[in-house]
Image (spheres, helix red, strand yellow):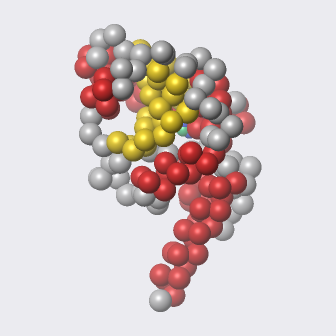
Amino acid sequence: MKLAVYPGSFDPVTNGHIDILERTSKLFDKIVVAVIHNVSKQALFTPQERADLIRESTKHLPNIEVECFSGLLADYVSGKHACAIIRGLRTVIDFEYEMQMAMWNRVLIPNLETIFVMSDSKYTFVSSSGVKEAALLGGNVSSLVPEVVERGLLAKLTIIRQNKEG
Ligand code: ADP
């Protein structure tokens, strides 16, 4: 079975991520979306919330599983017996960092390939951080994220406003 891991922060998942999953789910038997729990990075959604949002948004793709993980990606990927890591590319800005990561992972697991996939051109400017910034300032991001994520962002916005008032 050809299994690939798609790791990332997904804070939160966007239509850019979903586009990558729709493209790659046709290439592999199974894809495990690995939500990275990075304690040094402040996130808006908890790892569990992020994983649930991905699960809700990928119901139309039968071969996707979602898990949370922390630690070394190479260890996680080896444990899954994955043949590839999937990463998305937007612009050349992504490329330098992604290439370095791929080289590191090749040193750690020589027979593992990193597969880079480009999303539809309409998503090249979309990032989780951009979506969060716009949404938390009251902007409409409905064309950039799954509906369930839009609702999640609005719920976070309400909590933040309540905390400010209280
Ligand atoms: P990370 O913190 O690991 O970069 P992200 O959730 O931001 O996690 O992104 C996970 C992966 O998805 C990365 O490879 C990133 O380049 C890719 N990605 C994010 N947004 C898009 C997009 N709009 N189009 C294509 N790839 C994307």
Residue drawn where x is 40% and y is 30% of the image: 97
Nearer the observer, 91 or 87:
87
Nearer the observer, 55 or 18:
55
Residue projecting furthest to the top? 111
Residue 51 in sight: yes
Depicted 25 relative to depicted 140: above or below: above
Residue drawn where x is 27% and y is 28% of the image: 75
* Spot occupied by residue 24 in the image (x, y as percentages of width and height): 59, 23
Depicted 1 relative to depicted 19: above or below: above
Depicted 96 relative to depicted 12: above or below: above
* Spot occupied by residue 117 in the image (x, y as percentages of width and height): 57, 23
With 48 as the anchor, is 13 left or right in this view?
right
Depicted 165 relative to depicted 128: above or below: below
Nearer the observer, 6 or 126:
6
Residue drawn where x is 52% and y is 51% of the image: 52
With 124 as the anchor, is 107 left or right in this view?
left
* Spot occupied by residue 10 in the image (x, y as percentages of width and height): 50, 45
Residue 130 in sight: no
